[in-house]
Amino acid sequence: MPRYYTIASSCIVAPKDIKIAISLSSFDTPKQEKRLGLVSALCELMQTVQNMSVRIFAKDSNFDMNNNTPLLMVGPGTGIVPFIAFSDERKHLKNSGSPIAEGHLYFGCRDVDNDFIYRNYLASMVDCGVLAKLNHAFSRSKDGSPKQYVQDLLRKDKSTIERLLRDEQGSLYLCGATKMG
Ligand SMILES: Cc1cc2nc3c(=O)[nH]c(=O)nc-3n(C[C@H](O)[C@H](O)[C@H](O)COP(=O)(O)OP(=O)(O)OC[C@H]3O[C@@H](n4cnc5c(N)ncnc54)[C@H](O)[C@@H]3O)c2cc1C
């Protein structure tokens, strides 16, 4: 069975490279045995074993990001991956003198220390103006802070979201596990 991974890089910025980000899947079997996901564990192994090859298939896509209206991106966990590609592309456009519309990102994960992937990258996107704001929620903070999810942040930012989506005709992109519903 194939496993799907979202491309984390822009074909405009890096036409010959494909970046992906894989979260190592771990779970308990019904017999309470600890197991790792087949493909994600194999990918982890590939970092240490030399000359291992796998077959990959890249799907064609005619997706075209609209850079003229505001962008609202919601990505819990590895749901953030496509927005790394979006940000790469928006930075490239900005650096080449094209205007980019306002961009807001909502990221959620369990714990700030272990799960906040692309943390420095995202901070740099705020610094260079590609992201107007980075909003993050942590559901299992070790410091005992109350659980927060991206939907809590969205609720809190209701007026900004109304402005971006209703008044300025922005686009909302949501990426995450299918069990998010
Ligand atoms: C469109 C799409 C995009 C995706 N993008 C990404 C991405 O960018 N990054 C990313 O990390 N993932 C992504 N995924 C998820 C990815 O495709 C894989 O599902 C994920 O990496 C797990 O694969 P695996 O082979 O490691 O785990 P598997 O071995 O397939 O196990 C997956 C799950 O099945 C259950 N399971 C398996 N075997 C048993 C067992 N014996 N007993 C009990 N339960 C069991 C467990 O819940 C386990 O967590 C995406 C999925 C889709 C559909």
Image (cartoon, rainbow, N blue to C red):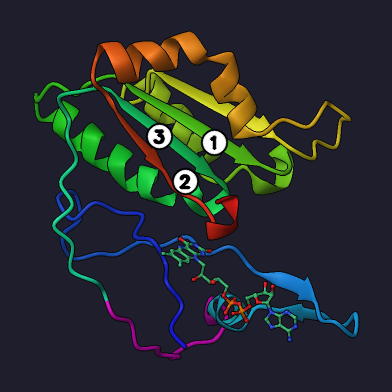
- Residue 179 among magenta residues: no
In the figure, is residue 161 to the left or right of 119? left
Label 1 amino acid? Answer: Phe
List the residue tagged with mark 1.
Answer: 107
Question: Residue 120: where, in percent of width, then height?
Answer: 51, 36
The quarter of the picture where residue 70 lies is top left
**The disc label shown at residue 73, or none:** 3
Task: Identify the element where label 3 is drawn.
Answer: strand
List the residue tagged with mark 2.
Answer: 80
Q: Earlier in the sequence, mark 3 or mark 1?
A: 3
Q: Residue at x 34, y 88 (%)?
A: 55
Task: Identify the element where label 2 is drawn.
Answer: helix
Question: Residue 145: where, in percent of width, then height?
Answer: 83, 26
Q: Quadrant of ligand 1?
A: bottom right
Q: Residue at x 14, y 50 (%)?
A: 12
Label 3 amino acid? Answer: Met
Q: Are marks 1 and 2 in contact (CB under 8 Å)?
A: yes
Label 2 amino acid? Answer: Ile
Front-most of 31 and 122?
A: 31
Front-most of 45 and 165?
A: 165
Q: Residue at x 55, y 86 (%)?
A: 49
**Residue stretch in magenta:** 46-57
Q: Gap between marks 2 and 3, in whole Å?
A: 8 Å
How many labels, in total? 3
Q: Gap between marks 3 and 1, in whole Å?
A: 8 Å
- Residue 50 among magenta residues: yes
Q: Residues within 10 Å of mark 2 (few under 14, many from 20)?
A: many
Establish if 71 lies above or below 50. Answer: above
Q: Earlier in the sequence, mark 2 or mark 3?
A: 3
